[in-house]
Image (tube, rainbow, N blue to C red):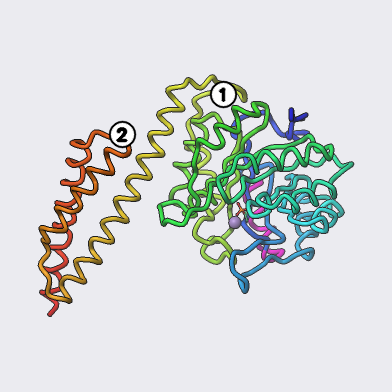
Amino acid sequence: MELELESILLPGIEAKRPLVIAGPCSAETEEQVMNTATELAQNGVKIFRAGIWKPRTRPGAFEGVGVEGLPWLQRVKKETGMYVGCEVATAKHCYEAIKYGVDILWIGARTTANPFAVQEIADALRGTDIPVLVKNPVNPDLELWIGAFERLNRAGIKKLAAIHRGFSQYEKSQFRNHPQWQIPIELHRRIPNLPIITDPSHITGNCDLIAEVSQQAMDLNFDGLIIESHECPARAWSDAKQQVTPAHLKMILDGIVLRDHTIGDKPRTEIDDLRQKIDELDAKLLQIFSERMKVSAAIGKYKFENNITVLQARRYEEILNTRRKQAEANNLNADFVIKVFEDIHEESVNIQNNIMKELSSKK
Ligand code: PEP
Ligand code: MN
């Protein structure tokens, strides 16, 4: 289905990259909202975000102040002139947010993953022309993400944009949510007019990595950034590690190098896409190396505790034989694969030797 799209830029918002949305993960108190908003507005931010209802992974965490926070957002609008936005996950959230004059809504990653919930929101918004930003679903499923845009569009919502916030994964990595840039790139190929706003806060989960990921998003010619900012991140009631102060946010934004000044289609060549894929695959390889070395270390500890030698010649033989067969089954050059595994084995032995030394010295 072709989407019928209109610009999400509300009056007074300039069409220049990056479109910036900033504010705390959660509205906590009226004072925290007003202090953060005032500072952000002074730094030139035009759109303020604050979660009112918070979808938390585990029960018992702070689940948002609820409707009590909506008048605070009204106050932000009135006193700073910024537009305000919050997350909605149910029809009731939509009615409440609109009643209090919230200008922009977003659908959270956990909600996008649920077509019933997205349909409920689309039905609740029918007849309005409020801009809706749709975060990618938590799982890397482009069709599910596109399906959410289609549901909203069928309900007459035309001011749509995507928020790329990364995808959850079981393995630990430097990112809280893996960016998998190829997915928003493919979204852009499928729906070229849909703006893409990157959320480096939820991708990284770490305030020290936000600048780098923001720059990457701009280098991919994405349109905007949504960044969590709190007057005092260390005291935040949710997502404390990834929030930045308004002053830090300003530094991040000032440091961004824009390599193309127009919003629109800088043609990506095929080699850019292929290199992107190589980068992603290498990152995965490194992550797997890291996990493998951790397992080696655990085996080293076991060998020490059970008085077994580090080098087990039969086991090494068996590894090389099975890997050779697996390489052939995967159409890989077996000699190359054996070379890689010899190096990996050497490093494992080094790690285990070090563990033996370390544990013996403690005895
Ligand atoms: C948020 O923006 O604070 C949020 C809950 O994000 P996500 O849906 O991406 O986890
Ligand atoms: Mn958050």
> Between residues 281 and 65, which one lies in front from this camera angle?
281
> Which residue type does callout 2 highlight?
Asn
* Residue at screen point 16% across, 76% down: 306
Ligand 1 within 8 Å of the CB at mark 2: no
Quadrant of the rendered structure where residue 183 is? top right
Q: Which residue is mark 1?
A: 261
**First to last magenta residue range:** 28-41
64 relative position to 183: left or right: right
> Between residues 126 and 50, which one lies in front from this camera angle?
126
Question: Could you tell me how far apart the alpha carbons at marks 2 and 1 are, in whole angstroms?
Answer: 45 Å
* Residue at screen point 72% across, 39% down: 149
> Between residues 356 and 159, which one lies in front from this camera angle?
356
For this orientation, the residue located farthest to the bottom is 363
* Type of secondary structure dominating the magenta stretch: helix
> Between residues 352 and 358, which one lies in front from this camera angle?
352
> Which residue type does callout 1 highlight?
His
Q: Could you say whether the residue bearing mark 2 is in a helix, strand or loop?
A: loop
Quadrant of the rendered structure where residue 262 is? top right
Please state, as top left, top right, bottom left or bottom right, where the N terminus lies in the image.
top right
Please state, as top left, top right, bottom left or bottom right, where the C terminus lies in the image.
bottom left
| Residue 158 position in % (x across, y down) | 79, 34
Q: Could you say whether the residue bearing mark 1 is in a helix, strand or loop?
A: loop
* Residue at screen point 47% across, 54% down: 206
Q: Which residue is mark 2?
A: 331
- Disc nearest the viewer among 2 and 1: 2
The label on residue 198 is none
Quadrant of the rendered structure where residue 132 is? top right
Q: Residues within 10 Å of mark 2 (few under 14, many from 20)?
A: few
| Residue 344 position in % (x across, y down) | 20, 49
